[in-house]
Amino acid sequence: MVNNKKFYVTTAIDYVNAPPHCGHAFEKIIADAIVRWYKLKGKDVWFLTGTDENAQKNAQVAKEQGIPVQKFVDKNSKLFIELCKKLNIDYDDFIKTTEKRHVKVAQEIFKKVYDKGEIYKGKYEGHYCKGCESFITEKELVNGKCPEHDKKPEWLSEEAYFFKLSKYRNQIIKFIENYIIPVSRKKEILSRLKNEELRNLCVSRSNLNWGIDSPIDKDFKIYVWLDALTNYLTGASGNWPADIHVIGKNLIICWL
Ligand SMILES: [Zn+2]
């Protein structure tokens, strides 16, 4: 079979709880410049960008504004599409993670990973920051508050599903050694991986009315990070794996 895979470039998908700012523009312009460079070199390129819409934060802000959540995320997602138009960002596909095509892929992947025994049910307890949409370790707290949001996190205890991330430590290290640039960021993340414990990743949330349903347990939603990451598969259009992911430095660190 002839391999028709295109050179595949992605960006982070943007949170739609607020309108775009210049950081979003910066990332898209960089990605677009890379795409144009490869096109000049004669490559066939597939360029994907989009918006991350299943976060609980969206449901909260929509409620505050008295708008249905889907309407709210659609409204803000449009602003990101307009931003791309204004900047002449030449993407091939714009993915919204509330689209049916994405929900289907996110659920299929979750199910596949579960069926392989890589996801298990356990219990999660800890400090949860709504702003970060994640648990924060004791060590990360500053004066009992999330350093990023300057807010006291809630204490949360819940049944949850976990992905056996720690099992893949060596593979992740190997991957990062080969791929991340600039080197300073690579060193930063490698030093954390080598010096800190890599915990299993909580991949579900309960008691939410917004998000993608877990395909294996109706009481749970798929954790928004896991659903967001699979957008690169949903939008790959046969070009998987991606050749370049352009992403903010905080997003690399977030996963550990
Ligand atoms: Zn926070």
Image (spheres, rainbow, N blue to C red):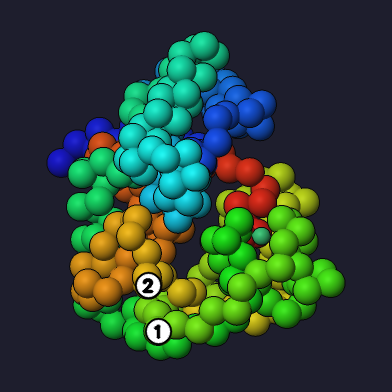
Amino acid at the residue labelled 1: Glu
Along the line of sight, the residue nearer the viewer: 51 or 125: 125
Disc 1 target residue: 159
Along the line of sight, the residue nearer the viewer: 240 or 164: 164
Residue 172 placement: quadrant: bottom right
In the rendered picture of this protein, how many numbered marks are placed on residues?
A: 2
In the rendered image, the vertical position of residue 226 relative to residue 165, given as above or below:
above
Circle 2: is it few (<14), some (14-19), or many (20+) Cα within 10 Å? some
In the rendered image, the vertical position of residue 90 relative to residue 190, given as above or below:
above
For this view, does 195 lie left or right of residue 47? right
Residue ID at (84%, 72%): 143
Name the spot of residue 132 as percent of width and height, x first.
Answer: 60, 58
For this view, does 45 lie left or right of residue 102? right
Where ligand 1 lies, by image quadrant? bottom right
Residue ID at (51%, 41%): 17
- Check disc 1 and report its element: helix, strand or loop: strand
Disc 2 target residue: 206
Residue 246 placement: quadrant: top right
Q: Badges 1 and 2: C-beta atoms under 8 Å apart? A: yes
Name the spot of residue 6 as percent of width and height, x first.
Answer: 34, 32
- Check disc 2 and report its element: helix, strand or loop: strand
Label 2 beta carbon less than 8 Å to ligand 1: no
Q: How far apart are marks 1 and 2 (CA)?
A: 8 Å
Amino acid at the residue labelled 2: Ser
Q: Is residue 81 visible?
A: yes
